[in-house]
Image (tube, rainbow, N blue to C red):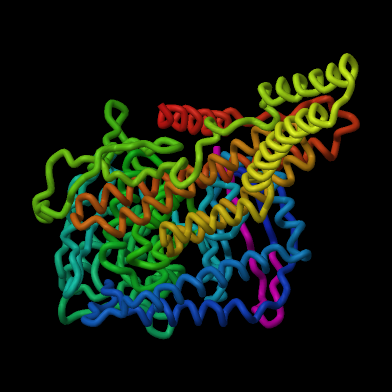
Amino acid sequence: MGKLVTLKFSDGNFEQGFTVTIQIGEEGAHPSSEISASLPPFTELPQLYDAWQALYLSMELPSRLFAAENAVTHVSFIEDCYDTAEKLTEKLNQWLQSPSFLPARELLSDNIQRMDEVRVLLQSGNSYLQRMPWHLWDLFDRRYHKAEIAIAAPSYSSVEPVARKSDKIRILVILGNSEGIDVSSDRAMLEQLPNAEVTFLVEPKRQQLNDELWQQHWDILFFAGHSDTQQDIGRIYINETESLRMEQLRYALRTAVTNGLRLAIFNSCDGLGLARSLFDLHIPQVIVMREPIPDLVAQQFLRHFLEAFSSGTSCYLSVRRARERLQGIEDQFPCATWLPIICQNPAEIPLKWSIPEPEKPPIQPAIDVPPPPIGNFNPPQVNTSNLDRNNPPSNPMPIAIAPNPTKNRESPMKRKRLFRLPQTYILLAGTAIGLTCFIALLRPRPIVLASGGAIAAIVFGAWSWQVKQEFAWLNENNLLDREVFGSKLEALERTSLATGMQWRRAKAWAKETHTFAEQIVEKEPDLTVEVLETLDTVLALAEQVTDAIAAASQVRSENYRVLAQRRLQASYDRLQATHELLQNLQDQVLLLSLDRNTSNLKVELPAQLRLAIDTNKITLQANEK
């Protein structure tokens, strides 16, 4: 059973601060824990959001809000958007780490396990609070991978629906005005849903839509087309000449909710205004896009969401997975992962997809591409210059994007270990014995002393030089040294010319991993060898990410681009997983150190982290042969 967390923001604003009540409990039960905390004034956050929104809109990417003829895609605009997004995220987390809010964080950490599935409801009427990138709250983004945050209205009530008359999920699909965009992809995905009855209304008239909502029983309402929000009022464009505010469908939607409507999905632009309009109708759950959404992003999100949701995954976890998978196209569409958001009626339980026992088929599963190994591999290179872009080969060869961690550096397996110089010791011992014999048995003569001393000096000098070289190598490759580790990351960035949000986040994870490593070694010196191996693995994974980014930007065929993006996502996920594993180890070490006097327990390397290190070693050894 999952957990339900509710954050109730009382009257307040960013100028005066907020009082927050936090409730935690099991799904379907009364809260088991509750505490109040406060967040201080922070006027910078709304300003940063406005700045990010202005940059995002200034790119004028072709979207389901409008079709821009001259989209601004200059690198500087994209980089500015990334920079502002990172600053907003940093300030949001800084605000949530305020001392006055610390009791809330402690309550969450004490009552939620890392693998718990968690629904988090943010209950507030403040429009800026609703728009903040809550999915990047460090507590849920990095610690709880099965948590998703939704917004909820300050006031709500439940509606008692009628009993369902069918075991299948009944979906009403509205394909509205599609000028300049492609909604046929949405239709194709919806037509293939398992255990579903789907009815399509293509650019319907207002009366036709109204009648369908009144007369039929629906579980899901889906809209694809143009929409926007003006003065906090959402509007959908149902055909070329008609548009509707949600208020104009009030009675029809209220009846649809009474008849069993559980979920509304607006795969269109700027949907927070739509969600606010639907709060009063008490629809159990609404999924919208908080800003204008590019056509490809809308299609990708719907595909990934339906794949997960129709296979039995909860609605919240399906949204999170679909949202995070959008990261693969953020090089073309900055901040795509910011767009989807759930709006929840706290009195209702999210819809669960009905799946017959004999079969649980997903819709159009993605091609099973094995993740790249941790380390390097040397797949055959592919020449894409002569490929037909419109007719790619049926069984394309994987893009050679995995890195070679031994590239531009000597393999550690071939390095000599410090002081492993037996021949030097033998020569030194022989020289010493020889000099002793000369002095003890023969009368010392200048030529004998000079020659023996010269031999000893030469041998001792060679030995000293070798020792110095070994110490120099040790200092230059001590990954626990922050400057050494940082310089290797910078070298990866320079040689690969990696840029963009994905590399920045991967680089940040690598640096945070080094911080965890320092703290672990400080408390548990016995883990030094394993931690050094982990840092070497992190560098190899970072190099995978840089090579994957380079490959994704160089391929010409769309088919190969998709494969390259998958390889990139796999490398990116491996780096994130290693970061999380070392963070878990750090937590264990710190907790054990607090009770060191009364505990004889010894911290051991997590099995998953050991597996990652061993896999990397095996790959390195294979490449040396």
**Residue 13 lies in magenta, yes or no?**
yes
> Which x, y percent locates residue 242?
20, 80
Q: Can residue 438 be seen in this view?
A: yes
Q: Residue at 57% x, 47% y: name it.
A: 144
> Which x, y percent locates residue 421?
67, 26
What range of the chain is rendered magenta? 1-20
**Residue 38 lies in magenta, yes or no?**
no
Q: Residue at 19% x, 63% y: name it.
A: 183
Q: Is residue 277 visible?
A: no
Name the residue furthest top: 441
Q: Viewer-proximal residue, 473 or 446?
A: 446
Quarter of the figure that contains the C terminus = top left
Q: Residue at 53% x, 30% y: name it.
A: 413
Quarter of the figure that contains the N terminus = top right
> Which x, y percent locates residue 33?
71, 49
Q: Viewer-proximal residue, 350 or 100?
A: 100
Q: Is residue 144 above or below residue 100?
A: above
Q: Viewer-proximal residue, 597 or 234?
A: 597
Q: In this view, does 102 lie above or below 178?
A: above
Task: Tell me: 86 left or right of 479.
Answer: left
Name the residue furthest bottom: 231
> Which x, y percent locates residue 374?
45, 37
Please tell me in which quadrant of the rendered image residue 558 appears.
Answer: bottom left
Count of numbered tags: 0
Q: Residue at 46% x, 58% y: name it.
A: 503
